[in-house]
Amino acid sequence: MRHLLRLQRTACLVFPALLACSVPKEAGFPEVAQSVAARGGERVRWLRGETTDEAIAAEIAHLLANPLTAARAVQIALFNNRALQATFEQLGVAQAELIQAGMLENPSIGVDAGLAVLGGAAVKISGDLGFDFVSLFSMAARVRIAEADFDATKLRVAADAVEFIGEVKKAFYRFQAAQQRAVVDAAISEAAQGSYETALALHEAGNVSDLQLAHEQDLYERVRVEVMESQGAVVATREAINRLLGLWGPSAGRWRVEESLPAVPAEEVSLEKLESLAIAQRLDLAAAQQRTLALAHSFGMARDWGWLAGGEAGASVEREIDGELLVGPRLELQLPLFDQGQAKSAKALAELRQSQNLVSALAVGIRSEVRERRAELLAYRHKAEHYRTVVIPLRERIVKLTQEEYNFMLIGVFELLQKKQEEQAAYHEYLDLVRDYWLTRVGLETTVGGRLTAAPANPANPSPASPSPSETPRAPQ
Amino acid sequence: MQEASGQAASVATAPSPGAARAGAPGGATTGAVATAAPPRIEPADERLPYIPVDTFGGATLPYRMVDGVKEFHLVAEPINQEFAPGMTVKAWGYNGRTPGPTIEAVEGDRVRFLVTNKLGEATSIHWHGVFLPCGMDGISGLTQPPILPGETYAYEFTLRQHGTFMYHPHADEMVQMAVGMMGMFIVHPKKPRQPRIDRDFAFMLHEWAIHPGTYRPDPSVMTEFNIFSFNGKVYPAIPPLVVRTGQRVRVRIGNLSMDEHPIHLHGYAFKVSGTDGGPVPVSAQFPETTVLVPVGATRDIEWVADVPGDWAFHCHKSHHTMGAMGHGVPNTLGADQSRASPRIRKLLPGYMPMGKDGMAEHQGHVESGHMKGPTNTLPMMAGKGPFGDIGMGGMFTIVKVRDGIADYGDPGWYQHPQGTLPYKVATPK
């Protein structure tokens, strides 16, 4: 009875129409959108050539017209990335499979006609109508499996979207860092150029040998090569963003990032109970669990209905040559003599166990990844803070004291500029550490399932998981 | 036996046990001459066989008479001394100063020196140039056991010569002398010789390696010294030698540094009248304007200061009349750094290229305050005269000869009579 009710519910659109039923358009996408929004507040849209697509295009254009932030980049990517849209289409595929599972098989009809070849206008016509009735019995089970698979697909698609958001944020931070490092490297280059130009002036005055001048130029050229590499990194990280945001043509070149990489926040978000949070929040784990459920249903079906291989029931009509019309029922049945479905059952059981093991392995892996990312995060925080509070002020102090010695003609300008370059190099290393902190933090967010804190009671108001835009300390000029 | 009263305020007038010594030992004494009124020039006290020596910027060692023996007390100790405002040196010296106070005695005196060691290692005192029994010669390990930290030894002998001598350690002497332990030892003749000396000065010159930003001389340095002093002071803090016009002047110079120094006097020619070996016979004296003082020697020079003025008196090795300077700096003479300097100034605010037309501009930049140097480091060039920057450091001072002065206090700058100054005849268009 329960089976029949479920049957009715899921295939309710089929029975009334019987022929040519339509497939519901949402295909479970609202649940996916809700999962994503609950984690970071970002909106996802499935673009299928509807009128709302124009509004979305306008919003993308508006977002691109302003300086890009991490949040804006994520939003544009969610709207504009075609590979993500392709992922959403998996929902259509899974939903179609669900509907297919709840659909009755079409009956088959056959007609034979026989004409006497030699002599006479005798015609024999026979026809039969058949309907696979066996599939009727297992339909409820098949629908249950397809439902579980559909739920798994929804979860997987949402997991892909959450991971995609993490990738966009990381690409943004990489670009931000590359842009800032290019500025610092340009300052190092200025110092090296100052050194070289001073050497040129001394050489012109006859105070420095050709060899010394060549040596100074060599030092300068090495720095220039590093600047070229820095600038190359800016281009590469920019293109990574363009790929994720689905941009090409003029819009790929026009967007700007004006903010600096945010400083490591003064207080770390609570890193307690992250493992349990990850197990509760990870959508791919939930998807794997749904898959296991589907396989459990498969096993149940194979065990209960495996012996019933197939059969047709129907009617047959025959019109003899002499005009006699014969009508009668028709039954075709496969006899489960050799194959009682024991192999199918065993296979289904093996697949079920396999899935259960994979879920456990995934859970263990997730917990370990959480611990690893957390340790990495704290290490980067510690290193970045050390640079900010100890190393950089020390290099600045060295420059100041060196300049005092220069002022009293105790050392020359080359040594002073060398110390300045070393000060900027410390700043360069600090930027790398800050960038790595944010990359690790996004990685941790994704590992924990999209947000670092448990979802609040009101799911319509998620707390931000992105960093607040406080400025990184500027390089001393 | 009393000391003459017309001398720098370091001489005790009432001998008693533990008499006040010149400068409190062991303290952070500055070597500046005390703020008491400058001594008056009085007719020489005919009871004294000598005019006391002016150790300008330094002090004279007091003594007390104990049963006919002149007893002096020297305390070997670590000290802090200001070489010039802005530079304090953690040195070792005697009785709170480097060089130690000048010993003055008379040929024939029986002298006793009580030597207390307040250093962290053993020391001794050698009486350079003095004829004495070998055991009193002061060579640690050779002629005496070392004076260990905390101990006091007594040296006693009779002086049987006169001249300009020195005293210094002979235990770990490389270190102890490098950080300042030395002093002058003047022995006057029983009867003043003729022509009579009216004004007698003494100074020890020395060289130090005090790396920029530090306070302590580096004793391991052998040739690269950067601070050069007279009596433990550097220009512009070396006091002037004040002389009344017409006086016969003698300057006694001692050198226990690592290099010879050619000491030059402006405006006069002098004769070298004595060494640490004794007086030079008049027939053997030849005229000089520069006396080369070798290491481990003294030189006495004499002349009559009959022309008034501010006469420079300095070592003629030009690097020795500068404050600390780097010797590995790039040579910027004649180089036009105008292309590079705006770029560098953006990275280093306050940066200025230096040296294109020489180094004299440096004094002005430093004094205007926008070129700060390392801690405890003197600028290369300093000092102001009545006509502008003098731009010196190190071994430089001035002999101020004046008509009719009543005391030996600094008389200010010389007022040049009309027609004795150069005058400008052309300016650039």
Image: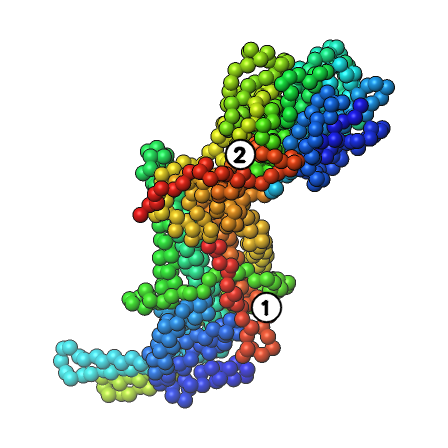
Screen quadrant of the N terminus of chain B? top right
Say whether mark 2 and mark 1 are on the same chain.
Answer: no
**Is residue A51 at least partly visible in the picture?**
yes
**Left/right of residue B100 with respect to residue B399 in the rendered view:** right
Front residue (pair B191, A244): B191
- Per the image, the residue denoted by label 2 is B309
Relative image position of residue A477 (x, y in whole percent): 46, 55
Q: Residues within 10 Å of mark 2 (few under 14, many from 20)?
A: many
Secondary structure type for disc 2: strand
Front residue (pair B245, A56): B245
Secondary structure type for disc 1: loop
Identified at 53% across, 34% down, the residue is B309
Say above or below: A334 vs A3.
above
**Is residue A429 at least partly visible in the picture?**
no
Front residue (pair A216, A75): A216
Say above or below: A318 vs A470.
below
So how many labels did they put on this image?
Answer: 2
- Per the image, the residue denoted by label 1 is A453
Could you tell me which chain the residue with mark 1 belongs to?
A
Q: Residues within 10 Å of mark 1 (few under 14, many from 20)?
A: many
The Cα atoms of the two marked residues, 1 and 2, are separated by 88 Å
Residue B35: quarter of image? top right
Relative image position of residue A175 (x, y in whole percent): 41, 59
Identified at 35% across, 76% down, the residue is A57
**Left/right of residue B99 with respect to residue A391 in the rendered view:** right
Relative image position of residue B297 (x, y in whole percent): 60, 18
Identified at 33% across, 34% down, the residue is A206
The image's colour scheme reads: rainbow
Q: Amino acid at mark 2?
A: Gly
Say above or below: B217 vs A348.
above
Could you tell me which chain the residue with mark 2 belongs to?
B
Front residue (pair A234, B402): B402
